[in-house]
Amino acid sequence: MAAKSDLLRLLEQLLSLPTAPFHERFVSSFLCAELKAGGIDFLLDEYGNIVATDGGSECLLACVAHMDHPGFEIIHATATTAEAAWYGGVDAKYFIGARVVIYDRASGAIRARGTIATITKDPLGRVEKMALSVNGRVETGDFGTWNLAPYRRQGELIHTKGADDLVGCAAILTMLKELKRRGLKKGIRAVFTRAEEQGFIGTLGMIRGGALRQSAKIISVETSKALPGVVLGGGPVIRLGDRASMFDHRMVVFMDRVARELQKGDKSFRFQRRVMDGGTCEATPYQLSGHVSGGVAIPLRNYHNQGTTRIGAEGVHIKDVEGAVRFLVEMAIRPEDFESATEELRRRIESGWVKYGGRLLKKE
């Protein structure tokens, strides 16, 4: 398994990169470079999504994560002001007066910093556009995010401008590298998508393009808002559903079996189970398109940078990320257990009928 130092290096490098919906090129380039260096086959589809493979011919299981985080794009600029289109779900109360950073669309270098002066909402009350006062020269097409530290470690916690979902990308990439190290070809795909925060745009492109066979089972790997019953440091979460849908019970049974057996062999491995309905993840659109889908969540503090009263860094626990990698590797090693896990549960439930069912046919 990947050393903790290797995982931390990957997290620091990845989380330090700028990203926003439709502006994932720097994250994408980094992931492609890591895959190439690791000797892992991959391709870019026509929408810019990345599909990597462990070398297995038939795709049995696909782990998906997205490369963007809520942010904005400059649509008009002057010497001291700018107008921007906002992409992603953040409550309107956080915007006015919040500080932002703006990146050069071509190089990714910081071009300016600014403050949000006014916002415009759509009919549903979601922020759609905003006016900025800026210190520095910006151009149409530049993009930005909240002005937060890219990466800061405090004990076992990582604070960052955007864990969602670059931490998920890091976990999947580490899983794929581990399969490569072990020389395993189990039919696993790693999928890194674009513009998830603006309505699963990259995901829907993949679905419509047929990049994954209908038989491929989907695991959405997300950082997801920590809710009552889930704690940071308590391990990865078997996600029973999200805000929009409940996931396939067969996937939950499979995940539960793998997690419990992993825990039997290593008491230090911890996991949690919950409906993580703080947001909607990529498992839902895949499930609606007919795929068997499920989710693994890494508990997240300050979901979408929404602190108690103002914008703040997102936070994840290193042990949860490490646990998620171990869990994904274990599921990837044994995708064929998917069917047997459900059959085992069926036999266990029906065993009572075999033993006692006849009693109901006898008269007292």
Image: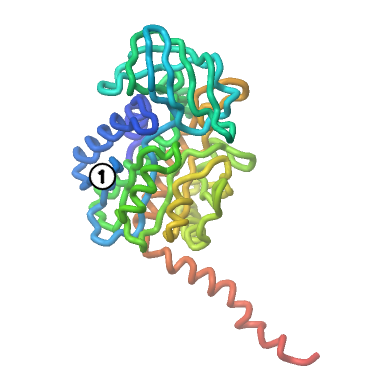
Q: Nearer the viewer, residue 82 or 21?
A: 82
Residue 5 seen from this side: no
Residue 102 x, y percent position in the rendering = 38, 18
Q: Residue at x 58, y 44 (%)?
A: 277
Q: Residue at x 50, y 24 (%)?
A: 313
| Location of residue 279 by image quarter | top right
Residue that label 1 marks: 46
Colour scheme of the picture: rainbow
Q: How many marks?
A: 1
Toward the bottom, the furthest residue is: 363
Q: Nearer the viewer, residue 320 or 51?
A: 51
Q: Amino acid at mark 1?
A: Glu
Q: Nearer the viewer, residue 196 or 118?
A: 118
Q: Is residue 35 above or below residue 111?
A: below
Residue 16 x, y percent position in the rendering = 36, 24
Residue 82 x, y percent position in the rendering = 42, 15
Q: Is residue 244 above or below residue 134?
A: below
Classify mark 1: residues with Cα within 10 Å, few (<14), some (14-19) or many (20+).
few
Secondary structure beneath dot 1 equals: loop
| Location of residue 331 by image quarter | bottom left
Residue 338 seen from this side: yes
On the rendered image, what quadrant is the C terminus found in? Answer: bottom right
Q: Is residue 63 left or right of 40 when viewed as pictured?
A: right
Q: Is residue 279 above or below residue 119?
A: below
Residue 114 x, y percent position in the rendering = 44, 12
| Location of residue 360 by image quarter | bottom right
Q: Is residue 166 above or below residue 132?
A: below
Q: Nearer the viewer, residue 272 or 140?
A: 140
On the rendered image, what quadrant is the N terminus found in? Answer: top left
